[in-house]
Image (cartoon, grey):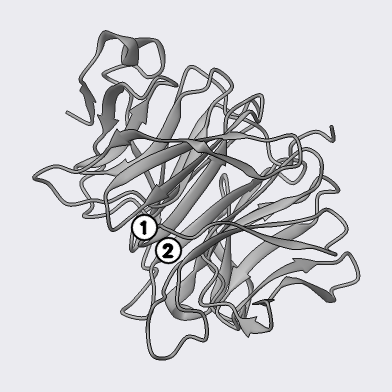
Amino acid sequence: MPIEQVSPGLASIVSSDRPINELATGFGNDNGPAEGPLWWHEGGYLLFSDIGNNRRMKWAPGEGATVFQEPTNFANGLTRDIQGRLIACDRTPRVVRHEPDGSLTVVANSYQGRSLNRPNDVVVKSDGSIYFTDPGAPAPEYQLDFAGVYRVSADLGTITLLVRDFITPNGLAFSPDESVLYINDSRRGHIRAFDMQPNGTLALATDRVLCDLRGDRPGVPDGMKVDVEGNIYCGGSGGIWVIDPSGQHLGAIVHGASASTNVAFGGDDWKTLFFTTRNELGSIDLNIPGIPVPVAAA
């Protein structure tokens, strides 16, 4: 069965007989998997990263997957800012913004004079501020001795270290009202939740483990998204886990691959859940739309 229902609540989100669509395959290698799906709504297509092959792919209905851009500095996570510009994490290492004229603006490449490790995933808040994860450290090749989660102000003038006690911070996503930031830790196999403070930082005293996604089947938390009702979609043991805002595991979308690297909502009504595995792009239709990207300006 492609849909594993752990709680009756899953039935309102996805039907048990809903097919899982394999859209394209042949991506990724030992240097990195397929990653970073991002729906470009006004164009009606999906962008995603083929990290190992150092290229950005485009998938459109009826057209399949084609090369959109190469090289990409082995880009990983993708999103858009509130003006609709593409934001990407790459291995330079940096977070960059793609301008309409084709130039790149560096969003972040260092913290307190030391180079970032390897920015992984990124999300933009409705005030224009940019949040990203930077796993990897401690390791001899990195200047920073910790893995961090950061906020960059909308004017790109200030970078703030939000939290540094994750082993492998990876996917991150806001609740629909942006009052909570979810960050997962691939190594520890769980999602943590933080209430937000008015200045855009985390209320660290509210730090809690929302859900543990470990099990006896392959799969760890990686990319993560949230729908308009606050449900969370994240890779976990056995497939893509669906978790309600209280942290209850509702069930899983079992696609059969060994890892779910990232997910994204798209389609005309934002009810298509696209997902990447190490080598494939797939999708499944849901009953609830995801939070649109870009988010509306505050």
Q: Are marks 2 and 1 in contact (CB under 8 Å)?
A: yes
Please indicate whether residue 24 sits to the left or right of residue 9 in the image. right
Q: Residue at x 63, y 35 (%)?
A: 196
* Whole-number angstrom distance, CA of label 2 to CA of label 1: 7 Å
Residue extending furthest toward the front: 205
- Tell me where residue 31 appears, x and y as whole percent: 37, 80
Seen in the picture, residue 96 relative to 58 is either above or below; the reply is below
Seen in the picture, residue 211 relative to 74 is either above or below; the reply is above
Q: Is residue 134 at all visible to an observer of this figure?
A: no
Q: Is residue 160 at all visible to an observer of this figure?
A: yes
Q: In front here: 175 or 179?
A: 179
Q: Residue at x 77, y 41 (%)?
A: 42
User: Which quadrant, please, contains the N terminus?
Assistant: top left
Q: In front here: 25 or 91?
A: 91
Residue 215 appears in which quarter of the rendering? top left
Residue extending furthest toward the left: 216
Q: Residues within 10 Å of mark 2 (few under 14, many from 20)?
A: many
Q: Residue at x 20, y 19 (%)?
A: 6
- Tell me where residue 63 appears, x and y as whole percent: 57, 53
